[in-house]
Image (tube, rainbow, N blue to C red):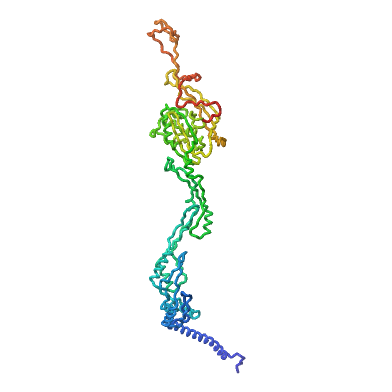
């Protein structure tokens, strides 16, 4: 039976047509690849085996007269390119300078004296080697660039090597610099700041190679060389202010080096810097050197004015008396005067009595004299020198000076008024006052046989006088107390210690200018302790019964009084007299003989009964 055939169902015929259709694109691709490979092979062959300069390579550059016209070397052999360049270079010359920047500074290197010229041989070699160095892909890219875009070779330059190196070394020296830190100087009313300089260190050999390479390669475009750089410290305006700042000083004596007061330190301007204003000025300036204004305070007097007014006036004075017969005390007073006489205080200085007089020792010449310890009086080295401190206090009050330290005695003294004494004790109590005037003060101390005088000599700037007014707040009279002393003979008496009335006072300083009261200020409150007068009495006299004459053979009653007018037979024995008990205290109401001598070292001050003690 014949097979049934359907339309389009011939597998053999259909299969042959399909195979034929799949081979044609593959054949085309293979053909194209063969063409590309052939072309590439040809190009590579040409790239490797051609001996001429690649197409698109030209030579050009800057000349002294402007841009050099391009010289096309495409396809030329080396000899042909050399000849073309030698001919072209006869009419052009390289640029005659090179700008070199090192750090923050730029300089121009003059090439006019180093024999610069274009060099044809080196330029030919550079043109020929283009596309012939590096990896294969790199070479292909280079040749492709020359073919499609063209490439310009910078002509090489020849120079006198020795002359060029000399100029480069000079340039390196000019551009090198040592680092300098910020500094400042004072000129009149301004502060001149130097911000400092960055240190630039150039390696000469490296710099030579760098600049020489740029020139010889014909690249005369601005060159930037990176040196080693050392920056200075940042400006510290606060530190500068602390270093330059000085207070205004009027003229003064150089007492540290010349205690005699014969050397004058001249007036000094006050100088200060406004740091905020200085910062603002620096921020607005790029200059290395900047001027900053200073705040100046001028002295209130000139050196000449100071010298002419020096020690012109007596500011305060005091004189007190002492008992010259008390040799130890007098010696101490005069010795303390000697230590103090001539001491000078500059304005603002503080006088210290203890620091000036020093320790009271036998080695320094002080002697024993009466000192008071509580209610008792006893000998002590340096006794009596409180009179000197009190006299100085008396004068300082009238000079209207600031009192820094003062303490009243424990009991009243007689040489200055109440409230105007000043006690001292080495290592414990000092007397100090301050020179709060505008001029130096000298302490002049003199003495005679039984008196001493203190003068505070300085300079008055106004017609000023001072009076002291003291008010007695309370008064406590002393009592007379009798105590028995068995060492005294019966009926004998002596004053052990004088009596001192107790006082509490307030003292005021009253200042007058041109006779008009300008101030009244509290000065001190002084408390003087009451000490009773103590009288020592010997034992009471014995009480003896009178003896009555009797028959010597008759025993006598010892209790029977005898007639004192009848003589007694000395051969008649009698009983010993009966004495009183020595421990029986004396009657404190018994009046004391007013002629009894008192301690002459500290006579009692006869104070008035009024409540106000007038200033001395």
How many numbered tags mark residues here? 0
Residue 510 falls in image quadrant: top right
Height in image: 141 above or below 493? below
Q: Position of residue 485 (x, y in %)?
A: 44, 21
- Residue reaching furthest to the bottom: 1
Q: Is residue 484 visible?
A: no
Q: Position of residue 382 (x, y in %)?
A: 42, 32
Q: Position of residue 220 (x, y in %)?
A: 45, 72
Q: Image check: 121 left or right of 410?
A: left
Height in image: 281 above or below 72? above
Foreground: 374 or 233? 233
Q: Image check: 106 left or right of 17?
A: left
The residue lying at 50 percent from left, 86 percent from top is 31
The residue lying at 47 percent from left, 37 percent from top is 457
Q: Position of residue 587 (x, y in %)?
A: 49, 19
Height in image: 581 above or below 110? above
Residue 219 falls in image quadrant: bottom left
Q: Quadrant of the N terminus?
A: bottom right
Q: Is residue 21 visible?
A: yes
Foreground: 537 or 336? 336
Height in image: 615 above or below 221? above
Foreground: 527 or 94? 94
């Amino acid at each position: 039976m014949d097979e049934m055939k359907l339309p389009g169902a011939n597998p053999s015929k259909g299969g042959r047509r399909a195979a034929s259709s799949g081979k044609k694109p593959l054949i085309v691709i293979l053909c194209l690849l063969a063409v590309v490979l052939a072309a590439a092979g040809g190009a590579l062959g040409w790239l490797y085996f051609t001996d001429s300069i690649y197409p698109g390579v030209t030579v050009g550059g800057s000349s002294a007269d402007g841009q050099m016209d391009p010289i096309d070397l495409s396809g030329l052999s080396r000899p042909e390119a050399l000849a073309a360049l030698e001919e072209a270079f006869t009419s052009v010359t390289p640029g005659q300078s090179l700008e070199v920047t090192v750090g923050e500074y730029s300089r121009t290197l003059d090439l006019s004296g180093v024999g610069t010229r274009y060099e044809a041989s080196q330029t030919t070699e550079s043109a020929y080697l283009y596309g012939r160095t590096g990896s294969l892909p790199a070479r292909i890219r280079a040749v492709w660039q020359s073919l499609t875009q063209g490439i310009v070779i910078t002509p090489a330059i020849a120079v006198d090597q020795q002359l060029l190196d000399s100029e480069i070394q000079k340039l390196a020296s000019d551009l090198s610099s040592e680092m300098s830190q910020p500094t400042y100087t004072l000129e009149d009313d301004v502060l001149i700041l130097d911000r400092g300089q960055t240190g630039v260190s150039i390696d000469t050999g490296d710099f030579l190679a760098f600049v020489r390479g740029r020139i010889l390669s014909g690249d005369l475009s601005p060159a930037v060389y990176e040196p080693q750089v050392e920056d200075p410290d940042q400006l510290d305006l606060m530190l500068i202010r602390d270093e330059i700042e000085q207070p205004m000083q009027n003229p003064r004596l150089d007492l540290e080096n010349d205690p005699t007061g014969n050397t004058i330190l001249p007036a000094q301007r006050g100088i200060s810097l406004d740091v905020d204003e200085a910062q603002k000025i620096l921020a607005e300036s790029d200059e290395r050197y900047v001027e900053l204004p200073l705040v100046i305070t001028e002295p209130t007097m000139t050196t000449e004015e100071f010298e002419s007014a020096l020690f012109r006036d007596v500011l305060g004075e005091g004189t007190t008396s002492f008992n010259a017969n008390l040799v130890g005390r007098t010696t101490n007073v005069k010795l303390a005067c000697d230590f103090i006489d001539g001491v000078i205080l500059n304005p603002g200085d503080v006088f210290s009595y203890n620091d000036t007089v020093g320790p009271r020792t036998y080695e320094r010449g002080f002697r024993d004299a009466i000192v008071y310890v509580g209610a008792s009086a006893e000998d002590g080295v340096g006794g009596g020198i409180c009179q000197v401190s009190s006299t100085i206090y008396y004068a300082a009050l009238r000079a209207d000076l600031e009192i820094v330290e003062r303490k009243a005695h424990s009991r009243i003294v007689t040489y200055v008024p109440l409230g105007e004494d000043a006690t001292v004790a080495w290592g414990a109590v000092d007397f100090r006052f301050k020179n709060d005037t505008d001029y130096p003060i000298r302490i002049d101390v003199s003495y005679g046989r039984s008196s001493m005088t203190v003068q505070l000599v300085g300079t008055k700037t106004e017609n000023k006088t001072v009076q002291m007014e003291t008010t007695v707040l309370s008064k406590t009279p002393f009592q007379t107390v009798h105590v028995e002393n068995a060492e005294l003979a019966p009926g004998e008496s002596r004053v052990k210690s004088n009596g001192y009335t107790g006082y509490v006072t307030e003292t005021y300083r009253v200042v007058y200018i041109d006779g008009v009261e300008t101030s009244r200020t509290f000065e001190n409150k002084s408390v003087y302790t009451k000490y009773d007068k103590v009288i020592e009495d010997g034992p009471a006299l014995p009480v003896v019964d009178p003896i009555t004459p009797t028959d010597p053979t008759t025993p006598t009653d010892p209790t029977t009084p005898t007639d004192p007018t009848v003589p007694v037979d000395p051969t008649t024995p009698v009983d010993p007299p009966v004495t009183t008990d020595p421990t029986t205290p004396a009657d404190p109401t018994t009046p004391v003989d007013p002629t009894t001598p008192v301690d002459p070292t500290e006579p009692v001050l006869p104070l008035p009964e009024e409540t106000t003690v007038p200033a001395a």
